[in-house]
Amino acid sequence: MTRNIIIDTDPGQDDAVAILLALASPELNLLGICAVAGNVPLPLTSKNARIVCELAGRVDVPVFAGCAAPMARALVTAEHVHGKTGLDGISLPDPQMPLQDRHAVDFLIETLRREPPGTVTLCPLGPLTNIATAFTRAPDIVERVQQIVLMGGAYFEVGNITPAAEFNIYVDPEAAEIVFKSGVDLVVMPLDVTHGALATPARVAAFRQAGRVGPAVASWLEFFERFDTEKYGSEGGPLHDPTVIAWLLQPGLFTGRRINVEIETTGRWTSGMTVADWWGVSGREANALFMGKVEAQGFFDLLTNRIARL
Ligand code: BDR
Ligand code: CA
């Protein structure tokens, strides 16, 4: 049986690879892509999502533009990581496929009301603004969500955009708090996982050989990881967002714990921190399956084999 998913995203090179992995996987039925402001502003993320669909030859996938700014604060972007376009690394043609007329939040609400309860999984790869806005406007949809599998937060690795916070949660902590308190079955891929998924030179070289689309993936990764390899002194940059899709395909690649995770929204130095009770000291009820490790080579093998099919 295929699983219905909606990807909510701010592409971003790693978002783009996650979208490609979903498009290459017959186990998943991608109902639509919602763009949100994050790595770059909304006009670029909604354009980049369509560039990726066209690269994969999938102009049939509907792409919706969503929220242009976080719920309660000004947008923070990450051109220093992703480049001016958000998809720097290879120059691809402007998309011909149109954006859908509907707002992404309306698409989320209408789809969750239309499909049978418990049959749609949400895959957020960026700030949680669209999802939290939909939950706030239409609380009836919350219990209809099958699962949310998202990239965001950190425990041992703590932060990447500030010393205390991971980018996706930092950009819109108010939205993240709504999602983490929603009661939906949550699976979280934090930096602790993604910093174990390094795109080493050998792995990037394997992408370059992976069919028609592989060379674009290799070029994106070479651009995207320059920032992190300098910062961490590692032999490759972490590949964050595809871990979400990989978990849907091969959950056995990952290990983690069901724990309580609270979102810091007011901290002077710690805004956007995921306060993850890994050791169970708070007594608060678990609200997320917080992953801790990935079997990295298995993850890259899955990714390269699937990308080679496109
Ligand atoms: C997350 O932030 C973005 O820059 C990446 O696309 C990923 O979703 C990692 O912190
Ligand atoms: Ca992202």
Image (cartoon, helix red, strand yellow):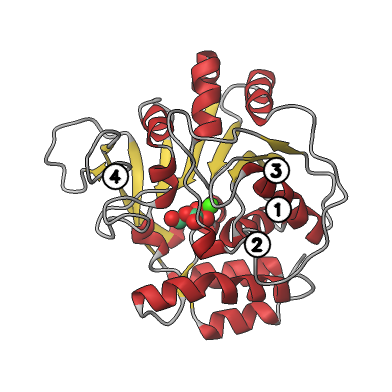
Q: Earlier in the sequence, mark 1 or mark 4?
A: 1
Q: Amino acid at mark 2?
A: Leu
Residue of label 3: 30
* Mark 3 vs mark 1: in front: 1
User: Considering the image in quadrants, where does the C terminus appear?
Assistant: bottom right
Q: CA distance from mark 4 to mark 3?
A: 30 Å
Discs 3/2, front: 2
**Which residue lies under the disc numbered 2?**
87
Q: Tell me if mark 4 has few (under 14), some (14-19) or many (20+) residues whose alpha carbon lies within 10 angstroms of its own.
A: many
| Mark with earlier residue (3, 1) | 3
Tell me the distance, in whole angstroms, between the alpha carbons under discs 3 and 2: 21 Å
Give the quadrant of the N terminus.
Answer: top right
Q: Amino acid under label 3? A: Leu
Front one among 111 and 81: 81
- Across and down, in percent, residue 43 comes to 69, 44
In percent of the image, x 68 and y 58: which residue is there? Answer: 20
Label 4 C-beta lies within 8 Å of the nearest ligand 1 atom: no
Q: Is residue 162 above or below residue 150?
A: below
Residue wearing tag 1 = 48
Q: Earlier in the sequence, mark 3 or mark 2?
A: 3
User: Does residue 83 appear to the left or right of 265 in the view shown?
Assistant: right
The 10 Å Cα crowd at callout 1, few under 14, some 14 to 19, many 20 or more, is many
Give the image location of residue 265, x and y in percent.
Answer: 30, 34
Q: Quarter-wise, where is residue 13 in the image?
A: bottom right
The reply to whether discs 1 and 2 touch (Cβ–Cβ < 8 Å) is: yes
